[in-house]
Image (cartoon, rainbow, N blue to C red):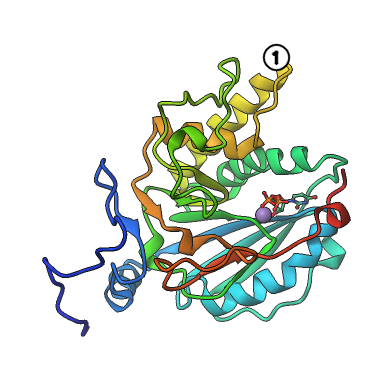
Amino acid sequence: MTYSQPSIVNGRTDVVSVTPWLAPVVWEGTFSATLLDGIYQRQNISVAATVFAVGKYIMFLKDFLETAEQHFFVGFRVHIYVFTDRPNEVPEVKMGAGREVTVQSVPSSNRWQEISARRMELIQKLIEERLINKVNYIFCLDVDSKFHGRWGAESLGGLVSVIHPGYYKDDRSKFPYERRPTSRAFVAPADGDFYYCGGAFGGLVQEVHLLAKTCRKNFEDDAKDGIEAAWQEESHLNRYMWINKPSKVLSPEYLWQDFKPKEPEIKIIRFSGVIKNYAAIRPN
Ligand code: UDP
Ligand code: MN
Protein backbone atom coordinates (compact mmCIF):
# COMPACT_ATOMS: atom_id res chain seq x y z
CA MET A 1 0.00 0.00 0.00
CA THR A 2 1.49 3.31 -1.07
CA TYR A 3 0.43 6.64 0.32
CA SER A 4 2.14 9.94 1.01
CA GLN A 5 4.21 10.27 4.13
CA PRO A 6 2.15 11.68 7.01
CA SER A 7 3.41 14.93 8.43
CA ILE A 8 3.25 15.80 12.09
CA VAL A 9 3.72 19.55 11.52
CA ASN A 10 1.99 20.32 8.24
CA GLY A 11 -1.71 19.90 7.69
CA ARG A 12 -4.88 21.88 7.45
CA THR A 13 -4.71 25.02 9.53
CA ASP A 14 -8.02 26.59 8.49
CA VAL A 15 -10.19 24.12 10.37
CA VAL A 16 -10.16 22.19 13.65
CA SER A 17 -9.61 18.48 13.08
CA VAL A 18 -9.94 17.22 16.64
CA THR A 19 -12.58 17.92 19.30
CA PRO A 20 -11.71 18.87 22.91
CA TRP A 21 -12.52 15.24 23.84
CA LEU A 22 -10.02 14.11 21.20
CA ALA A 23 -12.37 12.74 18.59
CA PRO A 24 -11.24 13.29 14.99
CA VAL A 25 -13.17 15.80 12.92
CA VAL A 26 -13.08 14.56 9.33
CA TRP A 27 -12.27 17.16 6.67
CA GLU A 28 -10.78 16.75 3.22
CA GLY A 29 -7.01 16.80 3.61
CA THR A 30 -6.97 15.16 7.05
CA PHE A 31 -6.95 11.53 5.91
CA SER A 32 -5.61 9.15 3.31
CA ALA A 33 -8.43 7.35 1.51
CA THR A 34 -6.01 4.70 0.20
CA LEU A 35 -4.72 3.92 3.67
CA LEU A 36 -8.18 3.78 5.26
CA ASP A 37 -9.65 1.62 2.50
CA GLY A 38 -6.73 -0.78 2.93
CA ILE A 39 -7.22 -1.00 6.70
CA TYR A 40 -10.97 -1.61 6.57
CA GLN A 41 -10.98 -3.85 3.50
CA ARG A 42 -8.69 -6.24 5.33
CA GLN A 43 -11.33 -6.42 8.09
CA ASN A 44 -14.03 -7.25 5.50
CA ILE A 45 -16.50 -4.93 7.21
CA SER A 46 -20.14 -4.51 6.22
CA VAL A 47 -22.11 -1.28 6.26
CA ALA A 48 -25.88 -0.82 6.47
CA ALA A 49 -27.70 2.38 5.63
CA THR A 50 -31.28 3.38 6.34
CA VAL A 51 -33.28 5.80 4.27
CA PHE A 52 -36.94 6.77 4.64
CA ALA A 53 -39.05 7.67 1.63
CA VAL A 54 -42.59 8.12 2.92
CA GLY A 55 -45.30 9.78 0.80
CA LYS A 56 -44.02 12.13 -1.89
CA TYR A 57 -40.44 11.80 -0.66
CA ILE A 58 -40.26 8.67 -2.81
CA MET A 59 -39.33 11.08 -5.64
CA PHE A 60 -35.89 11.60 -4.08
CA LEU A 61 -35.02 7.92 -3.84
CA LYS A 62 -33.70 7.33 -7.37
CA ASP A 63 -31.02 10.01 -7.20
CA PHE A 64 -30.14 9.02 -3.65
CA LEU A 65 -29.58 5.37 -4.59
CA GLU A 66 -27.82 6.09 -7.88
CA THR A 67 -25.39 8.54 -6.34
CA ALA A 68 -24.81 6.20 -3.36
CA GLU A 69 -23.66 3.62 -5.90
CA GLN A 70 -21.09 6.11 -7.17
CA HIS A 71 -19.79 7.46 -3.87
CA PHE A 72 -20.94 5.64 -0.70
CA PHE A 73 -18.47 3.00 0.53
CA VAL A 74 -17.46 1.97 -2.97
CA GLY A 75 -15.70 -1.42 -2.82
CA PHE A 76 -17.35 -2.43 0.48
CA ARG A 77 -20.30 -4.61 1.39
CA VAL A 78 -23.26 -2.22 1.61
CA HIS A 79 -26.90 -2.98 2.38
CA ILE A 80 -29.37 -0.13 2.04
CA TYR A 81 -32.71 -0.47 3.83
CA VAL A 82 -35.45 1.64 2.26
CA PHE A 83 -38.51 2.33 4.43
CA THR A 84 -41.51 3.44 2.42
CA ASP A 85 -45.29 3.36 2.23
CA ARG A 86 -45.01 3.12 -1.59
CA PRO A 87 -43.02 -0.08 -2.20
CA ASN A 88 -44.33 -0.31 -5.78
CA GLU A 89 -42.73 3.03 -6.62
CA VAL A 90 -39.22 2.11 -5.49
CA PRO A 91 -36.99 2.62 -8.55
CA GLU A 92 -34.89 -0.17 -10.04
CA VAL A 93 -31.30 0.82 -9.45
CA LYS A 94 -28.51 -1.44 -10.60
CA MET A 95 -26.31 -2.28 -7.62
CA GLY A 96 -22.65 -3.28 -7.78
CA ALA A 97 -21.21 -6.54 -6.48
CA GLY A 98 -21.71 -7.02 -2.75
CA ARG A 99 -24.29 -4.25 -2.59
CA GLU A 100 -28.04 -4.60 -2.18
CA VAL A 101 -31.25 -2.77 -1.37
CA THR A 102 -34.05 -4.11 0.83
CA VAL A 103 -37.45 -2.42 0.85
CA GLN A 104 -39.49 -2.42 4.03
CA SER A 105 -43.10 -1.19 4.15
CA VAL A 106 -44.10 1.38 6.74
CA PRO A 107 -47.43 3.11 7.37
CA SER A 108 -48.19 6.48 5.76
CA SER A 109 -48.69 9.50 7.96
CA ASN A 110 -50.45 12.84 7.78
CA ARG A 111 -47.75 14.64 9.75
CA TRP A 112 -44.14 15.01 8.57
CA GLN A 113 -43.11 15.45 12.19
CA GLU A 114 -44.33 11.94 12.90
CA ILE A 115 -42.60 10.43 9.84
CA SER A 116 -39.37 12.05 10.84
CA ALA A 117 -39.70 11.07 14.50
CA ARG A 118 -40.71 7.46 13.93
CA ARG A 119 -37.41 6.84 12.20
CA MET A 120 -35.71 6.19 15.55
CA GLU A 121 -38.20 3.47 16.45
CA LEU A 122 -37.81 1.76 13.07
CA ILE A 123 -34.00 2.00 13.19
CA GLN A 124 -34.05 0.47 16.68
CA LYS A 125 -36.22 -2.42 15.48
CA LEU A 126 -34.23 -2.98 12.29
CA ILE A 127 -31.04 -3.32 14.32
CA GLU A 128 -32.67 -5.68 16.83
CA GLU A 129 -34.33 -7.87 14.21
CA ARG A 130 -31.80 -7.97 11.40
CA LEU A 131 -28.48 -6.27 12.03
CA ILE A 132 -27.16 -6.97 15.50
CA ASN A 133 -24.15 -9.33 15.41
CA LYS A 134 -24.43 -9.45 11.60
CA VAL A 135 -23.41 -6.01 10.37
CA ASN A 136 -20.60 -3.82 11.68
CA TYR A 137 -21.65 -0.25 10.93
CA ILE A 138 -24.82 1.66 10.09
CA PHE A 139 -25.55 5.14 8.75
CA CYS A 140 -29.00 6.71 8.91
CA LEU A 141 -29.50 9.22 6.12
CA ASP A 142 -32.10 11.66 4.80
CA VAL A 143 -33.48 10.73 1.39
CA ASP A 144 -33.78 14.30 0.06
CA SER A 145 -30.06 14.38 -0.64
CA LYS A 146 -27.47 13.26 -3.14
CA PHE A 147 -23.87 12.11 -2.93
CA HIS A 148 -21.38 14.23 -4.88
CA GLY A 149 -18.09 12.96 -3.50
CA ARG A 150 -16.51 10.12 -1.58
CA TRP A 151 -18.16 9.00 1.65
CA GLY A 152 -16.13 6.03 2.81
CA ALA A 153 -14.11 4.35 5.54
CA GLU A 154 -12.83 7.66 6.92
CA SER A 155 -16.33 8.12 8.38
CA LEU A 156 -16.27 4.95 10.47
CA GLY A 157 -16.32 5.12 14.24
CA GLY A 158 -18.20 3.99 17.34
CA LEU A 159 -20.65 6.89 17.43
CA VAL A 160 -20.54 9.22 14.44
CA SER A 161 -22.28 12.57 14.06
CA VAL A 162 -22.24 15.20 11.33
CA ILE A 163 -21.89 18.93 11.99
CA HIS A 164 -24.94 20.78 10.66
CA PRO A 165 -23.94 23.12 7.79
CA GLY A 166 -26.26 25.87 9.00
CA TYR A 167 -24.76 26.75 12.36
CA TYR A 168 -21.13 25.72 12.50
CA LYS A 169 -19.75 29.23 12.94
CA ASP A 170 -22.39 30.31 15.47
CA ASP A 171 -22.23 30.70 19.21
CA ARG A 172 -23.75 27.71 21.02
CA SER A 173 -26.46 29.93 22.49
CA LYS A 174 -27.80 30.37 18.93
CA PHE A 175 -28.03 26.64 18.15
CA PRO A 176 -31.66 25.55 17.63
CA TYR A 177 -31.54 23.04 20.49
CA GLU A 178 -34.72 22.32 22.42
CA ARG A 179 -34.72 25.05 25.09
CA ARG A 180 -37.66 24.07 27.29
CA PRO A 181 -36.37 22.30 30.42
CA THR A 182 -39.54 20.18 30.51
CA SER A 183 -38.41 18.35 27.36
CA ARG A 184 -36.06 15.40 27.55
CA ALA A 185 -34.20 16.97 24.61
CA PHE A 186 -33.35 20.12 26.63
CA VAL A 187 -29.91 21.66 26.24
CA ALA A 188 -29.15 24.74 28.36
CA PRO A 189 -27.82 27.94 26.70
CA ALA A 190 -24.33 27.43 28.15
CA ASP A 191 -24.21 23.76 27.12
CA GLY A 192 -23.70 21.88 23.87
CA ASP A 193 -20.61 21.30 21.73
CA PHE A 194 -21.77 21.49 18.13
CA TYR A 195 -25.14 21.46 16.41
CA TYR A 196 -25.43 18.11 14.68
CA CYS A 197 -27.61 17.01 11.75
CA GLY A 198 -30.61 14.76 12.20
CA GLY A 199 -30.20 13.90 8.50
CA ALA A 200 -27.02 11.84 8.89
CA PHE A 201 -25.56 9.91 11.81
CA GLY A 202 -24.18 6.45 12.38
CA GLY A 203 -21.50 4.25 13.88
CA LEU A 204 -21.25 0.71 15.19
CA VAL A 205 -24.67 -0.98 15.16
CA GLN A 206 -24.58 -1.49 18.95
CA GLU A 207 -23.92 2.23 19.51
CA VAL A 208 -26.59 3.37 17.05
CA HIS A 209 -29.02 0.93 18.64
CA LEU A 210 -28.53 2.57 22.03
CA LEU A 211 -28.87 6.03 20.46
CA ALA A 212 -32.09 5.13 18.60
CA LYS A 213 -33.60 3.39 21.64
CA THR A 214 -32.81 6.34 23.92
CA CYS A 215 -34.04 9.01 21.50
CA ARG A 216 -37.21 7.05 20.79
CA LYS A 217 -37.98 6.63 24.50
CA ASN A 218 -37.31 10.29 25.27
CA PHE A 219 -39.44 11.35 22.31
CA GLU A 220 -42.32 9.12 23.42
CA ASP A 221 -42.06 10.15 27.07
CA ASP A 222 -42.14 13.79 25.96
CA ALA A 223 -45.23 13.04 23.86
CA LYS A 224 -46.97 11.60 26.94
CA ASP A 225 -46.31 14.95 28.62
CA GLY A 226 -47.72 16.74 25.57
CA ILE A 227 -44.40 18.13 24.37
CA GLU A 228 -42.72 17.78 20.96
CA ALA A 229 -39.11 18.95 20.75
CA ALA A 230 -38.34 21.90 18.46
CA TRP A 231 -36.74 19.75 15.72
CA GLN A 232 -38.15 16.37 16.70
CA GLU A 233 -35.54 13.62 16.59
CA GLU A 234 -32.78 16.06 15.63
CA SER A 235 -33.28 17.74 19.01
CA HIS A 236 -33.13 14.40 20.82
CA LEU A 237 -30.04 13.42 18.83
CA ASN A 238 -28.34 16.66 19.86
CA ARG A 239 -29.13 16.07 23.50
CA TYR A 240 -27.78 12.51 23.18
CA MET A 241 -24.53 13.71 21.58
CA TRP A 242 -24.05 16.28 24.33
CA ILE A 243 -24.26 13.55 27.01
CA ASN A 244 -22.53 10.80 24.97
CA LYS A 245 -19.79 12.46 22.97
CA PRO A 246 -19.38 11.11 19.43
CA SER A 247 -16.12 9.26 18.86
CA LYS A 248 -15.89 10.69 15.36
CA VAL A 249 -17.30 13.94 14.04
CA LEU A 250 -17.86 14.49 10.33
CA SER A 251 -17.45 18.02 8.96
CA PRO A 252 -20.28 19.71 7.03
CA GLU A 253 -18.74 18.19 3.86
CA TYR A 254 -20.85 15.18 4.87
CA LEU A 255 -24.19 16.99 4.77
CA TRP A 256 -24.23 20.27 2.97
CA GLN A 257 -27.34 21.99 1.58
CA ASP A 258 -27.58 22.80 -2.13
CA PHE A 259 -29.02 26.26 -1.45
CA LYS A 260 -26.01 27.29 0.65
CA PRO A 261 -23.11 29.02 -1.10
CA LYS A 262 -19.89 27.04 -0.69
CA GLU A 263 -17.58 28.28 2.07
CA PRO A 264 -13.77 28.46 1.64
CA GLU A 265 -13.09 25.69 4.18
CA ILE A 266 -15.38 23.30 2.28
CA LYS A 267 -12.96 21.74 -0.22
CA ILE A 268 -15.42 19.06 -1.32
CA ILE A 269 -19.14 18.49 -0.87
CA ARG A 270 -19.72 14.79 -0.34
CA PHE A 271 -23.44 14.68 0.43
CA SER A 272 -25.93 17.52 0.15
CA GLY A 273 -29.61 18.17 0.66
CA VAL A 274 -31.45 19.10 -2.53
CA ILE A 275 -33.59 22.21 -2.80
CA LYS A 276 -37.20 21.24 -2.21
CA ASN A 277 -40.62 22.84 -2.09
CA TYR A 278 -41.87 21.90 1.38
CA ALA A 279 -45.46 22.88 0.59
CA ALA A 280 -45.53 20.55 -2.41
CA ILE A 281 -43.99 17.45 -0.84
CA ARG A 282 -44.90 17.33 2.84
CA PRO A 283 -48.26 15.95 3.93
CA ASN A 284 -48.88 18.93 6.26
N1 UDP B 1 -39.56 12.07 5.37
C1 UDP B 1 -40.37 11.32 4.50
N2 UDP B 1 -41.60 11.80 4.16
C2 UDP B 1 -42.09 13.00 4.62
C3 UDP B 1 -41.28 13.75 5.47
C4 UDP B 1 -40.01 13.28 5.82
O1 UDP B 1 -39.97 10.25 4.07
O2 UDP B 1 -43.22 13.36 4.25
C5 UDP B 1 -38.25 11.54 5.75
C6 UDP B 1 -37.24 11.66 4.60
O3 UDP B 1 -36.30 10.63 4.69
C7 UDP B 1 -36.59 13.00 4.91
C8 UDP B 1 -36.52 12.94 6.43
O4 UDP B 1 -37.72 12.29 6.84
O5 UDP B 1 -35.33 13.11 4.27
C9 UDP B 1 -36.40 14.31 7.13
O6 UDP B 1 -37.35 15.23 6.65
P1 UDP B 1 -36.90 16.47 5.75
O7 UDP B 1 -35.82 16.05 4.82
O8 UDP B 1 -38.13 17.08 5.15
O9 UDP B 1 -36.30 17.46 6.84
P2 UDP B 1 -35.23 18.62 6.55
O10 UDP B 1 -33.98 17.95 6.06
O11 UDP B 1 -35.83 19.51 5.53
O12 UDP B 1 -35.05 19.26 7.88
MN1 MN C 1 -33.70 16.39 4.68
Density class for disc 1 (Cα within 10 Å; few <14, some 14-19, many ≥20) is few
Q: Which residue is mark 1?
A: 225
Q: Viewer-proximal residue, 181 or 222?
A: 181
Instruction: Dividing the image into four quarters, tell me where ligand 2 lies.
Output: bottom right
* Quadrant of the image occupied by residue 177: top right
Image quarter of residue 27: bottom left
Q: Nearer the viewer, residue 209 or 275?
A: 275
Percent x, y of residue 120 = 62, 40
Residue at 49 percent of width and 31 percent of height: 239
Q: Is residue 240 above or below residue 128?
A: above
Name above or below for residue 201 compared with residue 92: above
Q: What is the total number of numbered labels drawn onto the structure image? A: 1
Residue at the location (13% across, 71% down)?
7
Q: Residue at x 83, y 39 (%)?
A: 111
- Quick check: is the Cβ at mark 1 less than 8 Å away from ligand 1? no
Pick out the residue farthest to the bottom. Answer: 2
Estimate the x, y position of residue 23 in percent, counting from the top left: 29, 48
Query: Residue 273 placed where, x, y %?
Result: 64, 62
What residue sits 40% from the left and 61% below the top? 155
Amino acid type assigned to the residue bearing label 1 in the image: Asp
For mark 1, give the secondary structure: loop
Residue 170: x percent and y percent?
46, 44
Query: In the rendered view, does 128 fall on the left or right side of 86?
Result: left
Q: Quadrant of the C terminus?
A: top right
